[in-house]
Image (spheres, rainbow, N blue to C red):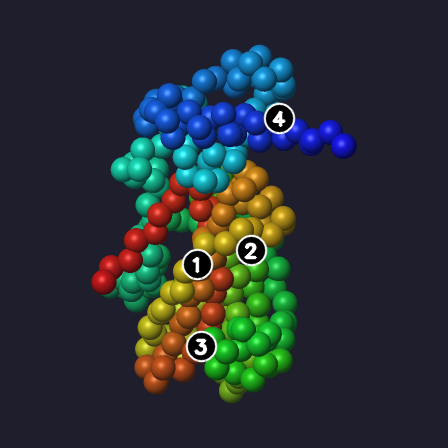
């Protein structure tokens, strides 16, 4: 009989730590053994240890605290970062995000024409294949600690017979002011779901292996319920919660 395949070392480390967390050997709120200690115990390098710990982070069993190490997560722990969701209008008529974060573009935005695929056409209530203005950018804040991918779609039919047939639309939130100046009263709806990132998204957001992202669709409609714009936001889902007023 062929010999049984042994598990990779990083998986052995993950299983050892997971079992210790579940049986109370490593209590909630306490640090895990150091990378150095685990590397010596299993005869591996520290990157292999990190790979095993990444599996536990992805399953929500542990959390990394900057400058302190990796700790067993309590089921009652709050995430380290909460972002209120929504758009509000200031007394001066400007639209701002509810979380108050000032985002900057980490690299030049990509501005293109995109033909609407079926899923987006359904949300925007336009025929599949209708051309759309598309604005795609990586945004950062807090000296690069916070990162998000932000993509905006505006159907060409929304821009017909307006100055923006020949003029480039601004990105959100200035986009909302441009739409309001065209006579629209705006409302916003968000759809949120977690999913695993594509490789380029994981790289851009600096997500460790196995960590999901939050995928948010924000639909902007006017006073008649007509969709005007659709945004996709991709946020790291490692230690983040989002909150909505009801």
- At x 36%, y 82%, the residue is 225
Task: Single out the mark in the foreground, 2 or 4.
Answer: 4
Q: Which residue is mark 4?
A: 9
| Residue 75 horizontal/vertical position (percent) | 31, 37
Q: Are marks 1 and 4 in contact (CB under 8 Å)?
A: no
- Horizontally, residue 222 falls left or right of residue 200, namely left
- Measured Cα–Cα span from mark 3 to mark 1: 22 Å
Q: Which mark is residue 193?
A: 1
The numbered mark, 1 or 4, whose residue comes first in the sequence reads 4
Bin the neighbour count of mark 4 within 10 Å (Cα to Cα): few under 14, some 14-19, many 20 and up: some
Residue under label 3: 228
Asked if residue 161 can be seen in this view, the reply is yes
Cβ atoms under marks 2 and 4 closer than 8 Å: no
- Which element is circle 1 on? strand
Q: Residue at x 63, y 19 (%)?
A: 45
- In the rendering, which numbered label is found on residue 137? 2
Q: Give the answer, above or below, for where 43 lies relative to 121.
A: above
Ranked by sequence position, the earlier of labels 1 and 2 is 2
Q: CA distance from mark 2 to mark 4?
A: 38 Å
Question: How much space separates mark 3 and mark 4, taking CA atoms?
Answer: 52 Å
What percent of the width, then of the height, locates residue 62? 41, 32
Residue 161: give x, y in percent of width and height. Answer: 51, 87
In the rendered view, tell whether residue 134 sits above or below residue 39.
Answer: below
Q: Nearer the viewer, residue 133 or 199?
A: 199
Distance from disc 1 to disc 4, alpha carbons, whole Å, reads: 33 Å
């Amino acid at each position: 009989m062929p010999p049984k395949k042994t598990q990779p070392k990083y998986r052995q480390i993950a299983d050892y730590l997971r079992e210790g967390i579940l049986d109370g050997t490593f209590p909630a709120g306490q640090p895990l053994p150091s990378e150095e200690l685990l590397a010596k115990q299993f005869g591996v390098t520290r990157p292999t240890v990190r790979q095993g710990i990444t599996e536990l982070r992805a399953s929500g069993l542990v959390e990394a605290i900057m400058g302190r190490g990796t700790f067993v997560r309590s089921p009652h722990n709050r995430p380290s970062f909460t972002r209120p969701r929504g758009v509000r209008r200031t007394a001066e008529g400007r639209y701002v995000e509810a979380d108050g974060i000032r985002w900057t573009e980490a690299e030049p935005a990509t501005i293109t024409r995109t033909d609407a695929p079926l899923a987006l056409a359904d949300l925007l209530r336009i025929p599949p294949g209708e051309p759309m203005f598309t604005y795609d950018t990586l945004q950062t804040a807090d000296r690069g600690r916070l990162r998000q991918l932000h993509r905006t779609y505006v159907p060409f039919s929304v821009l017909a017979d307006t100055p923006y047939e020949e003029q480039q639309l601004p990105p959100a939130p200035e986009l909302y002011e441009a739409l309001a100046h065209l006579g629209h009263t705006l409302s916003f709806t968000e759809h949120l779901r977690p999913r695993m990132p594509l490789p380029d998204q994981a790289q851009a957001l600096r997500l460790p292996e196995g960590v999901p992202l939050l995928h948010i669709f924000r639909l902007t409609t006017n006073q008649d319920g007509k969709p005007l714009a659709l945004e996709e936001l991709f946020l790291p889902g490692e230690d983040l919660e989002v909150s909505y007023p009801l």
